[in-house]
Image (tube, grey):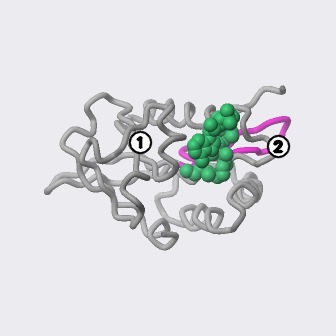
Amino acid sequence: MQPITVRPETHEDERAIDVVHISAFGGEAEAQLVSALRASSDYNRELSLVAELGGRIVGHVLLTRVPLRKGGSEKQLLALGPMSVVPSQSHRGIGSELIEAAKRLAREKGYGSIVVLGHPEYYKRFGFIPAKDRQVTCNLPAPEDALTALEVESGNLEGGGHVEYPEPFVALY
Ligand SMILES: CC(C)(COP(=O)(O)OP(=O)(O)OC[C@H]1O[C@@H](n2cnc3c(N)ncnc32)[C@H](O)[C@@H]1OP(=O)(O)O)[C@@H](O)C(=O)NCCC(=O)NCCS
């Protein structure tokens, strides 16, 4: 198989990223979520990673800076998602490469943790644990078990807190 390159998105990748999400999720909701997040003032392209294979975008993962609030204090984490890989290229490790790249990026940028709402069984293999084990909750009405978390920096989630996803996520859920 040709090598997979994981790199930050550019403006030219936007349509291809939409196509990846629409084909993988079978609907437009996640592509619309990415567009809505892109339109927000604090959108950071460096936190949006694409997987390229033979010059074609075949996967995408978005990281969004979110606050974790506890009492009067607040720290910034990264929320991972949406993430998808085109069905024709799934089960080849591309999703795994995207998550490992996201973990490296979080470390490089100095974020202590990543949270994700999604299939807990999938994320477990990358070190994500149930968020409730760290008393971490979020503002989205998803089943409690769907929220998992990874401490990029050991102990970062100690004491727990409440993650506030921005409005485009709230609109999706
Ligand atoms: C989930 C997804 C990103 C995985 O991408 P991928 O490139 O196929 O992932 P990898 O090749 O690294 O890993 C594949 C393994 O993930 C596991 N896996 C895939 N989807 C899973 C799920 N929903 N729940 C649990 N495990 C899952 C399988 O065990 C698979 O192993 P196998 O190849 O031995 O069957 C991709 O299938 C996808 O885009 N799905 C549709 C969109 C989606 O659900 N995104 C995630 C939202 S949380």
Q: Which numbered marker is on residue 114? A: 1
* Magenta-highlighted residues: 45-62
Q: Residue furthest bottom?
A: 171
Q: Is residue 98 left or right of residue 119?
A: right
Q: Position of residue 143 (x, y in %)?
A: 40, 60
Q: Secondary structure at mark 2?
A: strand
Marks 1 and 2, the one that precedes in the sequence: 2
Q: Is residue 54 magenta?
A: yes
Q: Nearer the viewer, residue 34 or 21?
A: 21
Label 2 Cα neighbours within 10 Å, binned few <14 / some 14-19 / many ≥20: few
Q: Is residue 107 visible?
A: yes
Q: CA distance from mark 1 to mark 2?
A: 27 Å
Identify the amino acid type marked 2: Arg
At 50% from the left and 51% from the top, the residue drawn is: 118
Tell me which residue sits at (46%, 58%) in the image.
42
Give residue 56's mark.
Answer: 2
